């Protein structure tokens, strides 16, 4: 499969998973089942009252990360930050408490990492999934594994300093890396864990999180906690035989359905390619939003090619 299809599939997968899941965001799984049976179509509504095909901050911040990385791939934090603030200045109704607090500190003059660290020291509650939900472009953009891990950490810690947020983002990025290289879901999960286990500086923290993740995958619960979220994503990917099945399984867990749907769709899109996305879902995404997704996908593909030629690496 062409790498362009995988990159485009990943970004579109985020968008359709987000749009599908937004309908049932914050609903208990039992309520989802009672109201919809199994939700399979993008119909809008939900607590935000979205039109069918509209997406939430999950896709917006994913596109912000993509844009920032393309602008400044070797040191993306400030460029990504400018994209974050451009979105935040539109006064979105869906900005989470952690990112809103950090954004306000940055507007007040703090650096991104200083603001995130201060918030973590003050509250110790920065293990939410708002860093994880936007991390796919990092996994798509970087060809060298150590740089991929470093850039994932740098972008995650712009808002979420907690080590659990960082590790879940790094696992997700590494999954995207191996899926982009053609491995299947099961092999990518194993390869990502193995590589991190061999190279991660705090192996005890990694192993603790991995054990927690495996335990939660056995009984997935869709919450705002980053480990719960990644467990739901991995469960959905392993449960579905294709992109459509995986995303439907993800959003019908209810709870943080748009984020779990977006993250599942992102990895499933990388695994199965753009062509695997149901046409009925694509039809709900407006031409203007499709143009934004296509531009981001093309830019990341060009960036990967340029970095490969400049640095002569791919491992």
Image (tube, rainbow, N blue to C red):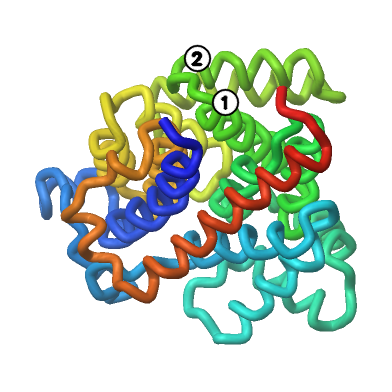
What percent of the width, then of the height, locates residue 74?
A: 83, 52
> Disc 2 marks which residue?
187
Q: Indicate the secondary structure of the residue bearing disc 1.
A: helix
Q: Is residue 78 left or right of residue 315?
A: right
Q: Nearer the viewer, residue 38 or 305?
A: 305
> Disc 1 marks which residue?
178
Residue depicted at 55% across the width and 34% down the height: 176
What percent of the width, then of the height, locates residue 184?
A: 44, 20
Q: Nearer the viewer, residue 146 or 40?
A: 146
Among numbered discs 2 and 1, the one appearing first in the sequence: 1
Q: Is residue 292 visible?
A: yes
Residue depicted at 83% across the width and 37% down the height: 311
Q: Is residue 128 visible?
A: no
C-alpha distance separating marks 2 and 1 = 8 Å
Residue depicted at 25% across the width and 41% down the height: 248
Residue depicted at 81% across the width and 75% down the height: 106
Say if 112 sits above or below 11 in the image.
below
Q: In the current view of this chain or complex, which residue is farthest to the bottom?
A: 90
Q: Is residue 303 left or right of residue 180?
A: right
């Amino acid at each position: 499969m062409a790498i362009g299809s995988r990159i485009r599939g990943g970004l579109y997968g985020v968008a359709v998973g987000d749009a599908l899941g937004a309908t049932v965001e914050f609903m208990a799984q039992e309520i989802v089942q009672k109201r919809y049976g199994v939700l399979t179509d993008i119909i809008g509504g939900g607590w935000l009252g979205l039109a069918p095909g509209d997406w939430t901050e999950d896709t917006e911040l994913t596109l912000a990360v993509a844009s920032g990385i393309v602008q400044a791939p070797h040191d993306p934090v400030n460029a990504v930050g400018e994209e974050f603030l451009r979105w935040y200045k539109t006064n979105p109704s869906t900005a989470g408490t952690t990112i809103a607090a950090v954004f306000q500190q940055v507007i007040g003059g703090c650096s991104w990492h200083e603001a995130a660290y201060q918030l973590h020291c003050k509250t110790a509650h920065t293990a939410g999934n708002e860093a994880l939900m936007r991390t796919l472009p990092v996994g798509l953009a970087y060809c060298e594994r150590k740089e991929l891990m470093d850039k994932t950490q740098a972008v995650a810690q712009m808002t979420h300093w907690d080590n659990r947020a960082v590790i879940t983002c790094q696992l997700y990025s590494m999954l995207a890396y191996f899926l982009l290289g053609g491995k299947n879901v099961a092999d990518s999960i194993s390869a990502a864990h193995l590589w991190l286990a061999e190279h991660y500086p705090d192996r005890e923290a990694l192993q603790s999180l991995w054990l927690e993740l495996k335990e939660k995958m056995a009984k997935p619960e869709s919450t705002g906690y980053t480990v719960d979220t990644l467990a739901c994503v991995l469960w959905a990917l392993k449960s579905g035989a294709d992109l459509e099945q995986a995303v439907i399984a993800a959003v019908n867990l209810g709870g943080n359905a748009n984020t779990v749907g977006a993250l599942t769709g992102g990895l499933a899109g990388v695994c199965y390619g753009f062509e695997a996305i149901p046409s009925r879902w694509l039809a709900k995404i407006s031409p203007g939003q499709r143009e934004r997704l296509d531009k981001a996908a093309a830019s990341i593909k060009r960036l990967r090619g340029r970095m490969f030629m400049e640095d002569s690496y791919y491992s």
